[in-house]
């Protein structure tokens, strides 16, 4: 039930690390190429994609570091272990993406009123490169089996679609004088990025604030614990989450009558059975006899 009983699998770790490292360098290099390419071709759509790829590279780097860090044992300074560091990484990542998105919007929105013609031929060749490189990365990563890699794979497919959009618009711009298409695409693309980022940042902030990760789950655990013999009532039931996956649970359990050590051991066995199906990293329970007063005065939950 706690981290000191936790085992970490190292099977396939090296191959997985290699694929993730490749995806990181592809995204980071590509973001750089796009920032320069977006500036040279005067295209805000490519700038929007550059911000997106920078975000991808950061997310991959953080996920990679977290994969290493979260396997680390808890110590006397971080007694809950290192899983919460992934929340910090998600916030930093989200902050960078929000700044980048606002920057792209501040370039693209004025261009709706006064469109500037981007260099369509340059956009076309960059888009060809983008489809090829991202398609290659998606193909490479699709061989991976870990959850991280599968998420990454869906993501890379999304990137290929983004580049196909740039490709189509660059072809249209080669034949038609519609420069407004470029800021339009970058605004749609950036709003899509922003909506995902904002949703993710809000979720992360709630986890930081130790909100109940899932109120239905809390009620379900409460109901199941109340079914155990001799547990009359429950208060101070606190459920919060280390990182959105592994939760922490503490509660005061009121007993219906004085019990022997044997019965107490049996109750703890029932609790262990009840909770075995949930992803709980740390659990702590306090037994309260009828004659006892609660140490923690405030009692509304
Ligand atoms: Zn333990
Ligand atoms: Zn992406
Ligand atoms: Zn409490
Ligand atoms: Zn109590």
Image (cartoon, helix red, strand yellow):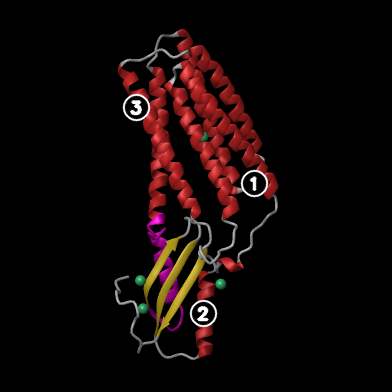
In the rendered structure, the answer to whether residue 141 lies left or right of residue 216 reads right
The answer to whether mark 3 is within 8 Å of ligand 2 is no
At a point 50% along the width and 22% down the height, the residue shown is: 36
Q: CA distance from mark 1 to mark 3?
A: 40 Å
On-image quarter of the C terminus: bottom left
Position of residue 266 relative to residue 80, above or below, is below
Query: Which region is colored magenta?
Result: 207-233
In the rendered structure, the answer to whether residue 22 lies left or right of residue 239 reads right
Q: Give the total number of marks visible in the rendering.
A: 3
- Using a 10 Å C-alpha cutoff, classify the residue at mark 2 as few (fewer than 14 neighbours), some (14 to 19) or many (20 or more): some
Q: Secondary structure at mark 2?
A: helix
Q: Magenta span has 215?
A: yes
Position of residue 51 relative to residue 203, above or below, is above
Position of residue 24 relative to residue 45, above or below, is below
Q: Nearer the viewer, mark 1 or mark 3?
A: 3
- Nearer-the-camera pick, 148 or 56: 56
At a point 43% along the width and 9% down the height, the residue shown is: 176
Asked if the residue under mark 2 is in contact with the one under mark 1, i.e. CB atoms within 8 Å, the reply is: no
Q: Secondary structure at mark 1?
A: loop
The residue carrying mark 1 is 145
């Amino acid at each position: 039930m706690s981290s000191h009983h936790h085992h970490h699998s190292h099977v396939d770790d090296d191959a997985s690390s290699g694929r993730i490292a490749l995806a990181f360098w592809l995204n980071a290099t590509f973001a750089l190429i796009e920032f320069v390419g977006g500036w040279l071709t005067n295209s805000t759509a490519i700038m929007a994609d550059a911000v997106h790829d920078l975000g991808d590279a950061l997310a991959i780097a953080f996920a990679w570091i977290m994969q290493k860090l979260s396997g680390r044992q808890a110590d006397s300074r971080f007694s809950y272990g290192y899983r919460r560091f992934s929340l910090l990484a998600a916030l930093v990542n989200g902050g960078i993406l929000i700044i980048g998105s606002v920057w792209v919007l501040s370039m693209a929105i004025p261009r709706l009123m006064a469109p500037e013609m981007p260099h369509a031929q340059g956009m076309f060749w960059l888009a060809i490169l983008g489809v090829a490189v991202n398609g290659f990365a998606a193909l490479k990563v699709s061989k991976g089996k870990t959850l991280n890699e599968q998420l990454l794979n869906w993501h890379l497919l999304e990137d290929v679609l983004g580049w196909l959009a740039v490709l189509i618009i660059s072809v249209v711009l080669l034949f038609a004088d519609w420069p407004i298409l470029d800021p339009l695409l970058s605004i749609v693309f950036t709003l899509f990025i922003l909506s995902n980022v904002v949703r993710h940042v809000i979720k992360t902030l709630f986890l930081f604030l130790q909100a109940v990760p899932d109120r239905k789950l809390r009620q379900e655990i409460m109901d199941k614990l109340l079914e155990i013999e001799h547990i009359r009532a429950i208060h101070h039931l606190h459920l919060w989450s280390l990182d959105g996956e592994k939760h922490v649970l503490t509660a005061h359990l009121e007993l219906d009558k004085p019990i022997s050590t044997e019965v107490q051991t049996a109750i703890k066995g029932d609790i262990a059975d009840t909770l075995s199906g949930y992803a709980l990293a740390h659990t702590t329970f306090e037994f309260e006899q009828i004659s006892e007063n609660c140490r923690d005065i405030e009692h509304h939950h």
